[in-house]
Amino acid sequence: MTTVENARIAALRSSFVATPVAAPTIVAPATRAIASPVTTAALERRQRWERYYRMRLVWTDLVIVLASAGLAAWIQIDTIAQVDLTDAPWQYGRVFLVTAAIWLLLLALFQSRSSRVMGQGMTEYKRVLHATGLAFGILAIGFVLMQSQGIRSQLLIAMPVGIVGLVLSRWLWRRWLQRQRVAGLYVSRAMVVGNRHDVEYVLSSLQADGRMAYHVVGITLDTGEDSEIVVGGEHYRAYGDLRSIASQATALGADAIILASTPDEDRGFIKRLSWQLEGTAAELVLSSPLVDVAGPRMSLRPMEGLPLIQVEIPTFEGGRHLTKRAFDVALSSIALLFIGLATPFIALAIKLDSRGPVFFRQRRVGRDGVEFFMLKFRSMHVDAEQQLEKLKQQNEGSGPLFKLKSDPRVTRVGAFLRKYSLDELPQFWNVFAGDMSIVGPRPPLLAETKEYGTSTYRRLYIKPGITGPWQVSGRSHLSWEESVRLDLRYVENWSVVGDFRLVWRTVGSVLKADGAY
């Protein structure tokens, strides 16, 4: 091969060798400053009082749990002190420590002191009861498997004493919290947002609530108008528009936003607003259009991109109603024993005050329109029915109800009986017999039912009660419309736990004697 050919081959080979290319220079864009939302003074204030109140509950729970478990251990040790005390202090001391630790841990895990349940509703009490029940269930299983001594006294003494103590302490702290809120402390500063009609409805509902959980510092109307709304004699100033809610909340020191309504054409409004409120507010509250539907009937059913609110349709038969009947029979049986002891004294007072029978029987309408005779201690003169026609023009009641604050038909003893609802005690016999319930709508007269509208008849879907929402919400001070609304809400949303709560609240209402005449 010649020198020329070799040179050609070398040149050809060099043409296939890749020439190194300099790597391109990548210029990084200007980095944008990214930082988490900064907590505002209003939100810090909200978190501060929530922590303060929560710590009060923590220390109270700690004292009650330690005292209950310690009492059970001490009684157990004292019981066997005369038999054999060799291993007792360590054995029962260990049970005491384990019981207290698990009990306190479950109270924390069940979030019984969460800010979402503090101050109102039954959820806080339910979580306390569920945590306590599970704690002692775990303890019972564990100590049985380990053949350990001392759990029996904890179950028989610590659990009931602790439950009573915990529930009572939570109730007392709620009363303290409500007094603080009346003084303007421990409240959420709220803004109400939406169209004028829905904003007015939310404001009136907050006023009627009476627990002062929210203090409205301003409103924002969807029209953006700078005006003022007057609800219940209170003046509320409108600020800004829907695009400036977060900035207005900061300016007004609001830590809660209540959405009375949202723009129909903007589905992403709530999500964007929640982003804007990060670091500014603690909660974004959505006002539901489901009026008078209680929480237990509503549940969230999440779907991809579509959170659905499921509403359970009320039923008026079944196991829950059998439980209500069992509750009625048990409570009325106990009440009749004490009423039997008091009846001779009440009967003597009625007889000495005016002539006539001790008891008054009146025809009332019960469940499904069935009539029955309701019993009461007589509180009026025997000719009260004949005097009614002459007094109708002085009626101070609303709707078909007849009420007269200074009714001349009422006797002196009758006025005292009515003031403290003692005249209604014989109705426990109606409950025992099955005509009435302890808790339910007010039993109407036949003449009243003839003036009922279509929806008002729903009051007759369940048995009438001795007490009910009307009894604890103003009694004779309520308007007819408000009385009907409360009764219908009860009919559709009642629960056994709610009945216990109404019975408890009735005791306070009777002692105050507010609205009774």
Image (cartoon, rainbow, N blue to C red):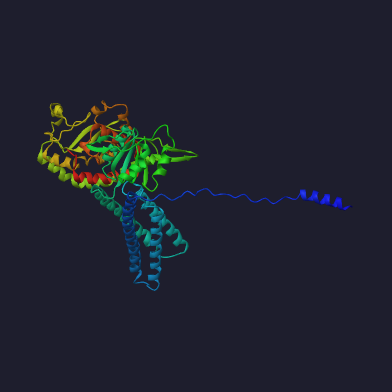
* Front-most of residues 224 and 168: 224
Q: Quadrant of residue 451?
A: top left
- In the picture, the quarter occupied by the C terminus is top left
Can residue 467 be spotted in the picture? no
x%, y% of residue 486?
A: 29, 36
Residue 325, compared with residue 20, is above or below; it is above
Residue drawn at (36%, 37%), measured in percent from left and top? 242
Residue drawn at (31%, 43%), measured in percent from left and top? 190
* Front-most of residues 426 and 324: 324
x%, y% of residue 439?
A: 29, 40
Left or right, residue 372 beside residue 159? left
Residue 101, compared with residue 502, is above or below; it is below
In this rendering, the count of numbered labels is 0
* Front-most of residues 509 and 203: 203
* Front-most of residues 431 and 268: 268
x%, y% of residue 288?
A: 37, 37
List the single residue furthest toward the right: 1
Residue drawn at (28%, 41%), measured in percent from left and top? 209
Q: Quadrant of residue 460?
A: top left
List the single residue furthest toward the front: 4
Residue 344, compared with residue 54, is above or below; it is above
Residue 83, compared with residue 419, is above or below; it is below
Can residue 216 be spotted in the picture? yes
x%, y% of residue 51?
A: 34, 55
Left or right, residue 278 beside residue 421? right
